């Protein structure tokens, strides 16, 4: 949804787990946490505190973590 970035909680190169909060978006006078959709490493951060953003705009790039050896063996 359209809104304003009120906080960026991650840095480039940081490891994140699925469900970790990446940024806080304010929309419709409410704060909405934007969470990681996968385990991985933060690549580029494309939004900064105070930015106005649009629906479906990419805010943070996450490079997925490689499959573990257990998953690769299945």
Image: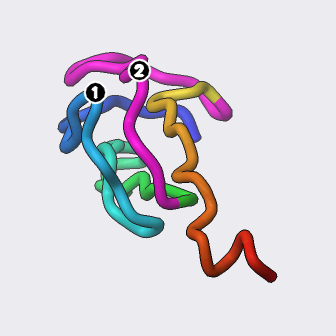
Counting residues from the N terminus, which is met first, the one under dot 2 or under dot 1? 1
User: Which image quarter: residue 43?
Assistant: top left
Relative to residue 70, is residue 7 depicted above or below? above
| Dot label at residue 44 | 2
The answer to whether residue 24 shows anywhere in this view is no
Task: Please give left or right for residue 66 compared with residue 51 in the image.
Answer: right
Q: Which of 33 and 35 lies nearest the eye of the viewer? A: 35
Q: Quadrant of residue 25?
A: top left
Residue 35 lies left or right of residue 15; in this view the side is right
Label 1 secondary element: loop
Q: Residues within 10 Å of mark 1 (few under 14, many from 20)?
A: few
In the rendered image, residue 14, in percent from the top left (x then y), is placed at 25, 41
Q: Residue at x 42, y 17 (%)?
A: 46
Looking at the image, which residue is at 58% across and 41% down? 1
Q: Residue at horizontal 56%, vertical 58%?
A: 37
Which of the labelled discs sits on residue 12, or is there none? 1
Query: In the image, what residue occupies the spot 43% across and 69% down?
Result: 19
Element class at badge 2: strand
Q: Is residue 57 left or right of residue 49?
A: right
The C terminus, quarter of image = bottom right
How many angstroms separate mark 2 from mark 1 (CA)?
A: 6 Å
For this orientation, the residue located farthest to the right is: 74
Q: How is the image coloured?
A: rainbow
Q: Residues within 10 Å of mark 2 (few under 14, many from 20)?
A: some
Q: How many marks?
A: 2
Question: Quick check: is 6 in the magenta stretch?
Answer: no
Of residue 41 and residue 57, the one placed in the foreground of this image is 41
Q: Are marks 2 and 1 in contact (CB under 8 Å)?
A: yes
64 left or right of 20 in image: right
Q: Is residue 31 visible?
A: yes
Instruction: Give how far across and how far down residue 38 sits, in percent.
Output: 55, 59
Residue range (magenta): 39-56
């Amino acid at each position: 949804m359209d809104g304003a970035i009120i906080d960026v909680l991650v840095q480039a190169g940081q490891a994140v787990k699925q469900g970790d909060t990446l940024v806080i978006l304010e929309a419709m006078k409410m704060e909405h946490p934007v969470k990681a959709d996968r385990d991985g490493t933060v690549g580029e951060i494309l939004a900064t505190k105070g930015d106005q953003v649009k629906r479906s705009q990419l805010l943070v790039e996450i490079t997925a973590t490689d499959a573990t050896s257990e998953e690769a063996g299945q």
